[in-house]
Image: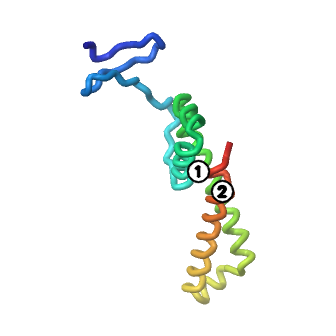
Amino acid sequence: MEKHIIGENGISYTLGADGLYYPDLKLSEGTHYEIGRFGRMRWEYLKTHRRGEYIRLLMDGKLNEHLHEVEEECNERMELLVEQMKAGAGITEELKARDQMKWVRLMNNVRGLVEEIIKRTDICMRRA
């Protein structure tokens, strides 16, 4: 058996140790981005609940770019919501200087709440 072949569809295949041919698929150049927690959550959602869209993005070489866009958008949304909630809750630099532990507690609560809001209602899961 040959080590490398080209199929009728024009895709090259490599012979694996188990005797099966596997397609030589690679990401397009320039589409490799580091993916954070929101991108990983979107990846899991697509894989589990939107299998067709996941496969389409993967085969088109656009999955990593899509996950990066979701990651960026969710992070921007998180920053905006944290700032808005800080202002509403009276979390200021003055409070930070006066009572650091209270400031840390309040900030942790705000960040946790914002993460839940984004996970449940935002683009990370339901983006088209």
- Tell me which amino acid carries mark 2: Glu
What residue is disc 2 on?
Answer: 76
The residue sitting at 56% across, 38% down in the picture is 51
Q: Quadrant of residue 15?
A: top left
Q: Is residue 46 above or below residue 104?
A: above
Q: Residue at x 61, y 89 (%)?
A: 98
Q: Quadrant of the C terminus?
A: top right
As measured in the structure, the alpha-carbon distance from the residue carrying label 2 to the one carrying label 1 is 9 Å
Dot 1 amino acid type: Glu
* Horizontal relation, residue 45 to residue 89: left or right: left
Residue 34 image offset from top left, x and y in percent: 49, 47
Neighbor class of circle 2 (other Cα within 10 Å; few <14, some 14-19, many 20+) is few
Residue 5, compared with residue 109, is above or below; it is above
- Write down the residue under mark 1: 71
Query: Which of the labelled discs sits on residue 3, or is there none?
Result: none
Q: Residue at x 51, y 43 (%)?
A: 33
What count of labels does the image hold? 2
